[in-house]
Image (spheres, coloured by chain):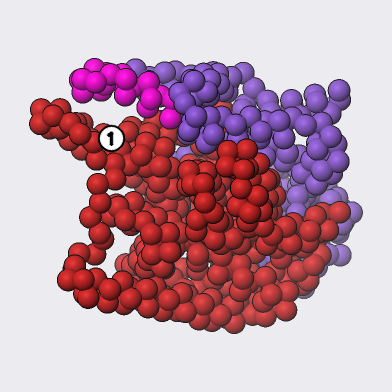
């Protein structure tokens, strides 16, 4: 592993998603700066996954090479980056016309009326709890990047990635025997609908590293930060922008995750033991992201723009795992019902339900593969 | 009723039986307090959670969908329950009732202690170890597969390795194909009767070398690797068509004489 690899990972999982996300914060009209940065990062990652799903399913079905897939993914990423560039130019153009040169507009969201003495104590408390939360999150990411946890499920996932990278194929090699095996036979039939391993193989090509190093060392560090980014957004939503409460929320969540080893199936186990596997990323990233989006949707009587993001999450969840394809429509159906009971807006409810349509299509194929 | 018990087993499996009961109890208390906090909390946290539980414990859904398509992994649907963040939300609401910062900090410590006492730490000797290498795979698997590939016999060779290595060889390099791997335990794909017979012999402390090597030759296995600390193997297998190739620690590798 070289500095070039680490730098490439930082670009792929920090800079590129944050840049992609600029488009979404403009669409969703998010004004608070810290929340905007977090939202941009999280939705940027989601956009990358969704683009991966859109590119990989037809390419795997058409038995294209991994090189072709990497090329197509890079083209799609470039188009998304250009879209964000256009968004930035438009926003700056409008601000220049108004004579406002700040990057994010100033807002009073989350600020409360307090006396000067209270204000100082609260500020110190907020900084202390925020630092503690950040330290705990970094510790969790560092442990997974530094130490070794072995999971036998990788015998399939990482092996498929190694075959793809070395043979320049996609899901045509048996992960154990290495015999030629079409994608629509056996277990790999399921993976046409959720080609997460091929997305990882493409990332390995882009950052130029071995799949085992990518999955076991590099990716978990970034993914844990991203997952807590989603939790921070949930905290901001639940506590109306109060950073002290959000920090406390993250501290308690960290403690709950670290002391959640009552079975290997719990959310804590998924997040802190095998986050590199698609199903663990569904449990720790996609499901909390859906909660965040549904909280935003439930707050508004009108339809708003958040349902648009749901469509993107639908593709991203499908890429990660078969369980993502199952969970998305179920959660969408449940929150659709809750939203209808709250707001009695059929149009909005239908729009929420329709956002699971991509998953619905993949679900039909996934269930056909299992039948 | 049988369906309900099966669902209940899935639930117990998910929380980890008695070990997870206290965390679930904590979650239940947090959810109950959310119920009385206000309309916003009921809408966002309580009602969806109740609906997810109703959905999960629905015997009809389990019988026709869960049992058929999510057999063995039905518990994964419980990921839709916001267990941890509802608990965290409840604890934050409780802690923030204290206005003075010092009291609040003490309350945070008390709440964290409550989580620690009721749970089980994920960082222990069973789950994490010092990394052997950057790949985070057993070093023996890397050394054995490197040795096999270094023979330069073909672009891909078939091998049989001890059970403790078969999950890792192909995570490192794909020019070593295995006669069987994790599929011997019923995962990924079915294995042939011959591969099953070889696996059975490799599981024994004193394998029937005649039978094992016969089957391996039939299956064109180029390398056989034994763990000599766990298995009693003759030093010379040339009578069976396999020559000593390399010894790496406790692992002895033999090569098929036709390919040597």
Q: From the top left corner, tell me how far across and down residue A169 is, in percent.
A: 66, 76
- In the shown orientation, is residue A255 left or right of residue A64? left
**Which residue is farthest left?**
A116
Which chain, by letter, is red? A
What residue sits right under mark 1 in the picture? A244
Task: Locate residue A289, reporting x and y percent.
Answer: 50, 49
What residue is shown at x 58% (from left), y 38% (from top)?
A342
Q: Is residue B98 magenta?
A: yes
Q: Nearer the viewer, residue A364 or B96?
A: B96
| Magenta segment boundaries in residue numbering | B89-109
Main secondary structure type of the part rendered in magenta: helix
Residue A113: x %, y % from top left: 20, 34
Residue positioned 80% across, 55% down in the render:
A367
Residue at the (21%, 23%) spot, across then down: B101
Q: Is residue A271 left or right of residue B173?
A: left
Image coordinates for residue A161, horizontal then vertical, percent: 60, 65
Judge whether A274 appears above or below A39 on screen.
above
Count of marks placed on residues: 1
Which tint was used for chain B? purple
- The C terminus of chain A: image quadrant: bottom right
Task: Name which residue lies at 53% across and 29% down.
Answer: B42
* Residue B103 in the figure: left or right of residue B23: left
Q: Residues within 10 Å of mark 1 (few under 14, many from 20)?
A: many
Q: Secondary structure at mark 1?
A: helix
- Dividing the picture into quadrants, the one containing residue B93 is top left
The image quarter containing residue A124 is top left
């Amino acid at each position: 592993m070289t500095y070039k690899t680490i730098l490439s990972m930082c670009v792929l999982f920090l800079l590129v998603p944050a840049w992609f996300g600029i488009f979404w914060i403009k669409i969703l009209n998010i004004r608070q700066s810290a929340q905007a940065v977090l939202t941009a990062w999280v939705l940027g990652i989601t956009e990358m996954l969704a683009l991966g799903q859109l590119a990989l399913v037809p390419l795997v079905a058409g038995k294209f090479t991994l090189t072709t897939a990497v090329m197509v993914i890079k083209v799609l990423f470039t188009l998304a980056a250009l879209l964000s560039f256009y968004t930035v130019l438009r926003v700056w153009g409008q601000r220049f016309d108004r004579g406002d040169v700040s990057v994010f507009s100033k807002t009073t969201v989350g600020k409360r009326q307090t006396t000067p003495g209270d204000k100082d104590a609260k500020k110190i408390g907020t900084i202390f709890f925020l630092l503690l939360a950040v330290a705990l999150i970094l510790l969790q990411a560092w442990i997974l990047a530094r130490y070794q946890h072995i999971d036998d499920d990788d015998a399939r996932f990482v092996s498929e990635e190694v075959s793809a990278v070395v043979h320049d194929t996609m899901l045509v090699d048996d992960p154990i025997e290495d015999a030629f095996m079409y994608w629509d036979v056996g277990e790999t039939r399921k993976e046409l609908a959720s080609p997460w391993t091929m997305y990882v193989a493409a990332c390995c090509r882009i950052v130029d590293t071995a799949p085992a190093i990518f999955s076991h060392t590099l990716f978990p560090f970034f993914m844990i930060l991203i997952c807590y980014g989603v939790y921070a957004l949930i905290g901001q939503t639940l506590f109306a922008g109060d950073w002290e409460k959000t920090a406390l929320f993250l501290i308690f969540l960290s403690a709950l995750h670290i002391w959640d080893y009552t079975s290997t199936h719990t959310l804590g186990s998924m997040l802190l033991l095998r986050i590199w596997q698609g199903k663990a990323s569904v449990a720790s990233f996609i499901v909390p992201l859906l909660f965040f989006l549904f909280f935003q949707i439930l707050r508004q009587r009108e339809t708003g723009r958040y349902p648009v993001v749901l469509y993107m999450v639908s593709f991203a969840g499908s890429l990660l795992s078969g369980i993502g394809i199952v969970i998305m429509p179920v959660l969408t159906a449940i929150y659709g019902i809750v939203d209808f009971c709250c707001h009695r807006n059929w149009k909005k409810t239908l729009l929420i339900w329709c956002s699971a349509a991509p998953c619905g299509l993949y679900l039909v194929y996934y269930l056909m593969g299992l039948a | 009723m049988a369906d309900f018990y099966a669902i209940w087993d899935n639930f117990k499996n998910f929380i980890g039986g008695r070990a997870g009961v206290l965390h679930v109890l904590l979650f239940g208390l947090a959810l109950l307090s959310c119920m009385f906090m206000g309309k916003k909390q009921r809408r966002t946290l309580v009602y969806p959670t109740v609906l997810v539980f109703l959905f999960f414990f629905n015997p009809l859904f389990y019988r026709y969908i869960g049992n058929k398509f999510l057999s063995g992994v039905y518990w994964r649907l419980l990921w839709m329950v916001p267990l941890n963040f509802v608990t965290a939300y409840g604890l934050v609401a409780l802690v923030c009732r204290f206005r003075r910062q010092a009291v609040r900090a003490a309350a945070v410590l008390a709440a964290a202690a409550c989580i620690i006492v009721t749970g089980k730490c994920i960082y222990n000797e069973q789950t994490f170890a010092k990394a052997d290498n950057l790949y985070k795979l057993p070093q023996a698997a890397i050394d054995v597969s490197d040795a096999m590939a270094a023979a330069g016999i073909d672009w891909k060779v078939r091998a049989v390795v001890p059970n403790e290595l078969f999950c890792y060889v192909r995570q490192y390099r794909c020019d070593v194909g295995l006669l069987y791997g994790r599929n011997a335990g019923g995962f990924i794909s079915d294995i042939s009767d011959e591969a099953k017979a070889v696996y059975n012999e490799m599981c024994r402390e004193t394998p029937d070398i005649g039978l094992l090597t016969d089957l391996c030759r039939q299956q064109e296995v180029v390398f056989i690797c034994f763990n000599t600390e766990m298995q009693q193997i003759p030093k010379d297998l040339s009578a069976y068509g396999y020559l000593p190739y390399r010894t790496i620690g406790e692992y002895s590798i033999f090569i098929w004489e036709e390919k040597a």
